[in-house]
Amino acid sequence: MREPSVAQSSQRIERLGQSSLQGGEFQSMAFISELRDPSTWYSKLVIAILAFVFIGFFAAAGISGYLMYKAISPAQRTSEIDLQNFPGHPQTLSYAAPGEGQREGWFFPGLKAAPTIMLCPAYGSSRGELVTLASALQDQQYNVFLFDFSAQGASNGRSTLGFREVSELHAAMNAVASRGDVDPNRFGLWGVNLGAYVALSEAISDHRVHAAAVESAYSQPEDMVRVYVARSGLGSLSLITRIAELEFRALNSHYRNVPPLTTSIGKLSGVAQLYLESPEDPILADTTTEIFRASPPPHELVVVSKGNYAGMLDDEKRNYENRIVSFFLVNLPATGAPGSVN
C-alpha cells in the first residue's frame, strides 16, 4: 500500500484543523445561544447565579462609594468663642493652608519663649470642642494653638483622612513659629484618630516636635474608612469595606507612596510619645497598639476607660486633662530640661 505523500498528509491535517475550528465555533455559538435563551434547568441556574453575582457586586460598589463619599465629607461642627472676653486672652492667627487658601486659628499665649502645644481635632470634631483642654495647658504656661483641618468647623474642602492634613498642620506650625514670642524649635502635638495620624506623621518628619500625645491612632488613612464603614453598621460585610478602601485609595492615588506609620514610626527615636487606647473603638484600639509596638522609646501606652474628649463629662475631662498636662510637663516643660516617660 502506498503511503500518503507529505502534501496529502498536510492537507489532511489542515482539514482536521478546520473541522476542529468549526466545531469549536459551533460550541461557542451554542453556548452563547444557551445563555440568551436557556433551555435546561442547569443553564437557567448558572445564569441566575451570574446575574445575582453581578447585581450584588454593583450594589456593593454603589454602597461602598456612598459610604466613602460620606467619610470624606463629614458633617461639620462650627464653634465660635468671644476672644475678647474669653479667659486666657486667645488671639486670632491667620495662616495659609497649602491648596486650601487662608485659614485662621486661635492662639492661647503662654510664657514668652515657651514651647507651643498644637491640638489636632478628631475626625468630625472642631477646634471649639478643645478650648478647655487648651486652657488647662495654658495654665501651665504653654502656648497653645487650636485650628481646624479641611471639612472641620468653618474650613471648606473635603477630608483626605490624614494625607493632606499633615501639610495643613505643618503650615499652622510655621505660622506659630514665626510669631517671635514662642520657642520656634519646641513643639508638642496632641490628637485623636485623624488628629493622631496627622500628629505622628508630622512628628516623624519635623525635628521641632519633641513630644506627642495621641489617642486612637491609625497607621494609614484607609483605616479610618474601615472605621467609618463599621460605624455605619456594615462592617461585617467585608466586600463593602474592601471596595470602600480601594475607592478611597484610588481617589487619593497621588499619595500612594506615603508609607503606613508602622513602617516609619521608628524615626521617632528621642521624641516622647504617649499612646492612649480606648476600648470604645476596637479597630482603633488595635491599630494604636500596633503603632505603639513598632515605635521606639521613650514611649508609653495607656488604656483609658473612655475616649472622645469632646463627649466626656466634666470629671472625666479633668482626669484626661491632668494626664495630658502631666505628660507634657515631664517631657516638654515650659522651662527647664525634660524628664522621661516610662
Image: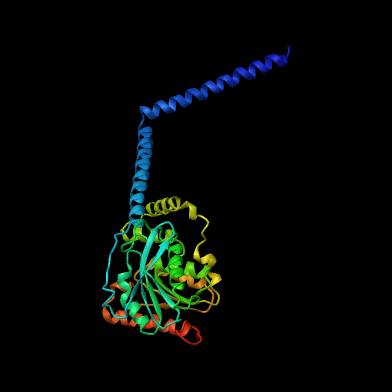
Instruction: Return the residue nearer the eye: 44 or 199.
Output: 199
Note whether 23 is above or below 201 in the view shown: above
Q: Give the quadrant of residue 169.
A: bottom left
Residue 271 locus on image (x, y percent): 52, 76
Q: Is residue 96 above or below residue 323?
A: above
Left or right of 260? Residue 314 is left
The percent coordinates of residue 251 (x first, y second) are: 43, 51
Q: What residue do we see at 36% from left, 53% from top?
A: 68
In front of the other: 21 or 288: 288
- Residue 98 lies left or right of residue 312; in this view the side is right
Residue at the far top in the pictured view? 2
Q: Is residue 214 visible?
A: no
Q: Residue at x 38, y 79 (%)?
A: 109
**Image point (34%, 77%), residue name:** 133
Q: Residue furthest toward the front?
A: 180
Residue 74 placed where, x, y %?
32, 59
Report the colour scheme. Answer: rainbow
**Depth check: 12 or 158 in front?**
158
- 313 or 89: nearer the eye? 89
Is residue 192 visible to us here? yes
- Residue 327 % position (x, y): 43, 82
Determine which quarter of the picture holds residue 17. Answer: top right
